[in-house]
Image: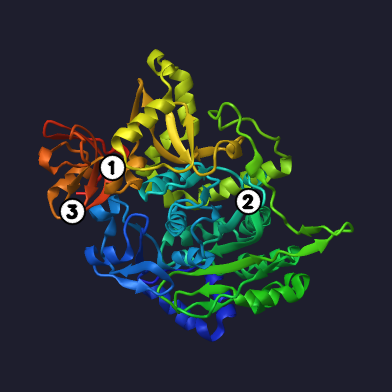
Amino acid sequence: MAVQLPSIFAERMKSLLGDEFEQFMKSYEQSPHAGLRVNTLKISLEQFKEIAPFDMRPIPWCGTGFYVPHGVKPGLHPYYHAGLYYIQEPSAMAPVELLNVKPGERVLDLCAAPGGKTTQIAAKLQGKGVLVTNDIHAERTKALAKNVELYGVRNAVVLNESPERIANAFPHYFDKVLIDAPCSGEGMFRKDEDMVKSWENHSVEKCVLMQRDILDTAAKLLAPGGTIVYSTCTFAPEENEAMIAEFLNINPDFVVNDIPESAGFAPGRPEWVRQMLPEKAEETGSVLEQTRGTARLWPHLLEGEGHYVAVLQHRVESLTEEDGSVLLIGQAVDTDSIEPNESVEPFIRASAPISKEERKRERLMRTESRERNDKHTRGGKAQGKQGKGNERGGRKNERAQGRGTDQANVDPGTVYAQFVQENLEIELAGETVFYGDRVYQSSVGAARLEGLKVIRPGWFVGTVKNGRFVPSHPLACALNAAEAQRFVNLSSAEGEAVRYLKGETLNIEEARVERQADTVAKGFVLVCVDGFAAGWGKWLDGVLKNEYPAGWRWTSV
């Protein structure tokens, strides 16, 4: 059944597309395309092709992306719960591919929830470098944090901040910045009819205000010579070519990196800005033509929904001072020299006062984000339970309960190190950060996070309770079998795997607990599905006590 499009939208698209309009409209009679992306943090592409439980076709613009047949439900398989793939709309995979992330880089996903593009970036980093992922809407960070943890990301920090306040903490720090900008959502009409109903309430004008502020701040976050990828899921030229042209006009040290017209990608349309926004075209002058090198993804030209992508490259220019020294324009501030405070515990602290103008912008962005995206967290309601463990909530609980006498007398670092030595075969990278009774491995460290609203300061590895270290589910998700002293393998073809994911206790013979030499079977066991980590269990006398967290359990029949 064809989608009922708003008449104003249809009339505008007819004016813009001309002869293409009829073909464009026919695309709304087709079903949206479903896709998944293989999580190469946990499995290689070749391995997944061998064990894939359903038919797949490659997505041309994403080497790890595949179309799945209509009606197939990849979320109803143990491999989904083991984090082997992320279910993602095919066009939405394009921006990260164009960001061209390399292992070891510092990357920021500025408008990240629910986390699909974040996990895509993480797979490209392969655990090396820094990934900061952020969403301004607190409710959505719950799904974001869960996806970071489910997909085994070790080097991420999750924030709930405005772009401006991140820029204060990370000036000119990131090699790559992704902006999946809040937008009017016209490209999603076929996939989500709720977007049609809410379109008139989320005006293009309001979105433009947010996009302008986000882009302006992104330039302050980027290191010299870095790259910004700006993307939307709308067709509106005001939010696309006009926004990029305005940014280039204000920031002449940036240029558009042309996106090849391949895989069905169409060029940007600067002539639409001249047609619809003549004053903006005159204001931006010759830089507007650069936007022809951006890309539009059209539902009638490829198998995916409507998107727009621009790759913005910073040019490092130099000026010679009178004394002969060379000054790099936009040179990064060396914040690595910041010394951490003696106490790394209170991440959420009072920080610099916020101006009225900045506070107004934050309110606008949060309100628009909440109204536009609440329905997208429907799948995150169960996920949201996991968010109760965020750092602010953890701090409140700690204040309410106080510290036990035993815990106060035990060095958490010693307890943690002992657990790692006795249960893992791994050298944990990054700075170990203790927040109350929670332990993290942070790729960034505590000093940079002072004053920010932190959801996860790093890889959450466990808690120290009553003098003992209890490993976290995110620790298990990011491990492989060779990194655990003990593991047990469950087959996806048998009922055991689903029973484990539902939280049931299992009877497991001692011979099935595979372990390193001189390691007893008793204790924490990494539970794997077909060899891929899914969570923890505790084995004793033939019984595997289930440690799979209640908020994550398989609830499907």
Position of 402 relative to 429 (above/below) = above
Residue 396 image point, x, y percent: 48, 25
Residue beneath disc 1: 484
Identified at 12% across, 31% down, the residue is 541
Identified at 35% across, 35% down, the residue is 420
First along the sequence among labels 3 and 1: 1
Identified at 27% across, 60% down, the residue is 73
Q: Residues within 10 Å of mark 3 (few under 14, many from 20)?
A: some
Position of 8 relative to 375 (above/below) = below
Residue 404 image point, x, y percent: 40, 15
Which callout, 3 or 1, points to the residue nearer the camera?
1
Which numbered dot is residue 139?
A: none
Residue beneath disc 3: 492
Marks 2/1 in contact by CB < 8 Å: the verdict is no
Q: Residue furthest right?
A: 322
Q: Residue furthest top?
A: 405
First along the sequence among labels 3 and 2: 2
- Decide which of 160, 494 is in the foreground and name it: 494
Q: CA distance from mark 3 to mark 2?
A: 43 Å
Q: Amino acid at mark 1?
A: Ala
Q: Amino acid at mark 2?
A: Tyr
Q: Determine which quarter of the picture holds residue 410.
A: top left
103 on left or right of 501: right
75 on left or right of 520: right
Residue beneath disc 2: 173
Marks 3/1 in contact by CB < 8 Å: the verdict is no
Assign the N terminus to one quadrant of the image: bottom left
Identified at 41% across, 67% down, the residue is 90
Q: Residues within 10 Å of mark 2 (few under 14, many from 20)?
A: many
User: Element under label 3?
Assistant: loop
